[in-house]
């Protein structure tokens, strides 16, 4: 899985459809409808929804 934000190919896998990029601290997730959702990982460990530009 390549990070759609920074292009980093060394992303970590959290589960079958969830990945994270340790370079820009985002979590990527595919919904059942194959829509890509991005979440910014905040300093306190919570996540905030992001939208693709
Ligand atoms: Zn990235």
Image (spheres, rainbow, N blue to C red):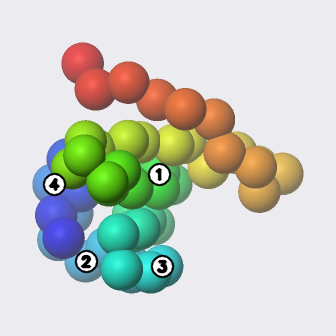
Q: Which of marks 3 and 2 is in front?
A: 3
Badge 1 residue CB within 8 Å of ligand 1: yes
Task: Assess disc 4: are there few (<14), some (14-19) or many (≥20) residues with their C-alpha within 10 Å of its C-alpha.
Answer: few
Label ID, residue 14? 3
Label whose residue precedes the other's in the sequence (3 or 4)? 4
Q: Nearer the viewer, mark 3 or mark 4?
A: 3
Question: What's the CA distance linking mark 3 and mark 1?
Answer: 12 Å
Question: What's the CA distance linking mark 3 and mark 2?
Answer: 13 Å
Badge 4 residue CB within 8 Å of ligand 1: yes
**Residue extending furthest toward the right:** 44
- Please give the name of the residue rendered at 41% of the width and 42% of the height, measured from the top-left corner: 38
Q: Is mark 3 on a helix, strand or loop?
A: strand
Residue that carries the numbered disc 2 in the rendered image: 10
Label ID, residue 26? 1
Residue that carries the numbered disc 4 in the rendered image: 7
- Please give the name of the residue rendered at 47% of the width and 56% of the height, measured from the top-left corner: 27
Q: Nearer the viewer, mark 3 or mark 1?
A: 3
Label whose residue precedes the other's in the sequence (1 or 2)? 2
Q: Where is residue 25 in the image (x, y as percent from the top left)?
A: 50, 54
Left or right of residue 12: residue 35: left
Residue closer to the observer: 30 or 4: 30
Q: Nearer the viewer, mark 1 or mark 4?
A: 1
Residue closer to the observer: 22 or 39: 39
Q: Do the residues labelled 1 and 4 touch (CB within 8 Å)?
A: no
Does the image show residue 14? yes
């Amino acid at each position: 899985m390549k990070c759609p934000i920074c292009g980093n190919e060394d992303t970590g896998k959290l589960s079958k459809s969830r990945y994270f990029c340790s370079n820009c601290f985002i979590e990527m997730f595919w919904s059942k409808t194959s829509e890509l959702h991005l979440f910014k990982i905040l300093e306190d460990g919570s996540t905030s929804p992001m939208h693709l530009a």
